[in-house]
Amino acid sequence: MSLPYENATIGSRAMEEIQKILKGFGCNKFGSWEDYDTGTLTIQFQWQGRTVDLKASASGYAAAWLKEHPYTYRTRCSKHEHEQKAIDKGRIAVYSILRDWVKAQVTAIETGLLTFEGVFMPHMLLPNGQRLIDRVDDVHKLLEPPK
């Protein structure tokens, strides 16, 4: 069985589409970067004075890919090369995943299904630069860890 997005090929095209979607939605600022150490892709944009910070983990996708495609003695590369392939797949897939997620959320807002705050509030930046979801978790411990 294949993992969704494992055959995605070009992250830059997905990023261009994200930027186009957000610009069409009325966002006036947009930026993105990849942290190679943590395997995290970050997209930041501003809409009506509210800054949103979305993060996606290529490492998380790589772990899911390895679970779907475990290394065996029949694999035609070393274990290290197989793990590197998973990371490479994750680095490309997260762009497409975020593109589809952003497109769905913006569509939900534009059609009145959800509000901007209902969709993006956890990812909004507070004046201190911290995301709201991280602040709630750090200070109030309202979110219980998954079991």
Image: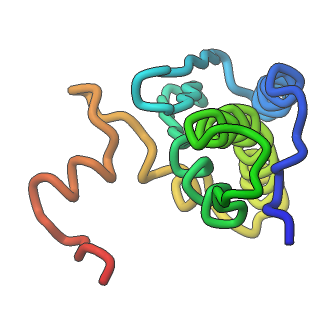
Residue lying furthest left in this view?
A: 139
- Which sits in the foreground, 15 or 20? 15
The picture places residue 100, in percent across and down from the top left corner, at 81, 49
- From the viewer's side, name the closer residue of 36 and 72: 72
Residue 7: x %, y % from top left: 89, 46
Pinpoint residue 10: horizontal percent, then vertical percent: 87, 26
| Position of residue 55 in the picture relative to residue 3 (left or right) | left
Q: Give coordinates of residue 41: x percent, y percent.
A: 56, 30
The structure residue drawn at horizontal position 75% and vertical position 69%, both measured from the top left corner, is 113
| Residue shown at the point (88%, 40%) measured from the top left | 8
Quadrant in which residue 109 is drawn = bottom right
Q: Would residue 140 appear left or right of 147 to someone viewing this image?
A: left
Q: Quadrant of the C terminus?
A: bottom left
Image quadrant for the N terminus? bottom right
Q: Residue at x 51, y 39 (%)?
A: 55
Residue drawn at x 49%, y 20% as measured from the top left? 36
Q: How many marks?
A: 0
- Picture layout, residue 113 above or below residue 127: below
The single residue placed furthest to the front in the displayed view is 73
Q: How is the image coloured?
A: rainbow
